[in-house]
Image: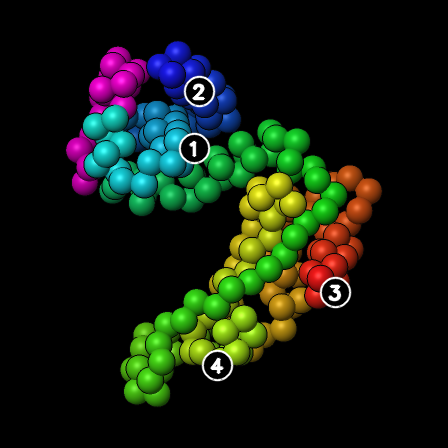
């Protein structure tokens, strides 16, 4: 198990470090480099460790010396929040390395994200203007909130996602989600994104 983890972390670090390249930084370099931070974050997700505190205890116990410096939980959390845009791009770059990314079929689905139930809540909420009323067919009821849209491959690799007001047509949301991520629709195997998603939605409605 330790050898497998060492191999995983080494491969991740090399790939991420090559992807980052030389990035100019002013001031003193951090004790934990960006490449090391991203490697830790991606490995934590791959190994399904939900607790940051548990992960920061796990790494030195099972992989001593793998990372010369590990921050405290609060320091790790602050660095992750600051590096969130970089982390998103890194995950997308790693996804592009897989065969799953080139699957010509995409599956699109959505689920309600309920943000409140009472009318006073809808009026007072800071989400007013973003959230709205929508109908959830699976529960046969109306809700106030947002709708989470996900586009992924049949194997489960996420391509992109969007949070939108529930009364917006799903096709408009999906078109906007793919358009906002140019690399999602740039050159792909024979079947186009819109055709794949439409076929997938059609099959799901018939089933």
Mark 3 Cα-neighbour bin, 10 Å: few <14, some 14–19, many ≥20:
few
Magenta residues, start to end:
59-75
Q: Are marks 3 and 2 in contact (CB under 8 Å)?
A: no
Q: x%, y% of residue 15?
A: 49, 22
When the figure is inspected, residue 119 is found, relative to residue 186, above or below; the finding is below
Say if the magenta span includes residue 184: no
Q: Which residue is mark 3?
A: 206
Residue at 30% x, 87% y is: 120
Compute the Cα span from label 4 to label 2.
Answer: 46 Å
In the picture of the structure, the residue carrying the numbered disc 1 is 46
Task: Name the outermost residue toward the front.
Answer: 207
Residue that numbered label 2 is attached to: 8
Would you place residue 87 above or below residue 60 in this image?
below
In the figure, 12 relative to 83: above or below?
above
- First of labels 3, 1 by sequence position: 1
- Dot 1 crowding, Cα within 10 Å, few <14, some 14–19, many 20+: few
Q: Secondary structure at mark 1?
A: helix
Circles 4 and 1 in contact, beta carbons < 8 Å: no
Q: Nearer the viewer, mark 3 or mark 1?
A: 3
Q: Residue furthest bottom?
A: 119
Q: Which mark is residue 21?
A: none
């Amino acid at each position: 198990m330790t050898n497998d983890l060492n191999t995983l972390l080494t491969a991740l670090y090399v790939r991420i470090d090559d992807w980052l390249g030389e990035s100019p930084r002013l001031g003193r370099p951090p004790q934990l480099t960006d490449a090391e931070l991203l490697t830790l974050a991606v490995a934590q997700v791959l190994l399904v460790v939900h607790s940051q505190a548990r992960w920061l205890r796990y790494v030195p116990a099972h992989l001593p010396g793998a990372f010369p410096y590990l921050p405290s939980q609060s320091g790790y959390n602050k660095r992750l929040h600051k590096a969130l845009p970089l982390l998103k791009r890194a995950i997308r770059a790693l996804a592009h390395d897989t065969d799953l990314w080139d699957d010509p079929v995409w599956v699109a689905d959505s689920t309600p994200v309920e943000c409140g139930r009472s009318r006073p809540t809808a009026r007072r909420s800071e989400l007013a203007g973003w959230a709205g009323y929508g109908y959830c067919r699976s529960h046969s009821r109306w809700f106030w909130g947002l709708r989470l849209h996900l586009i992924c491959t049949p194997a489960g690799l996420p391509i992109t996602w969007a949070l939108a007001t529930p009364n917006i047509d799903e096709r408009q949301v999906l078109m906007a989600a793919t358009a906002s991520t140019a690399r999602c629709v740039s050159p792909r195997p024979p079947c186009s994104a819109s055709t794949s998603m439409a076929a997938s939605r059609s099959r799901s409605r018939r089933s």
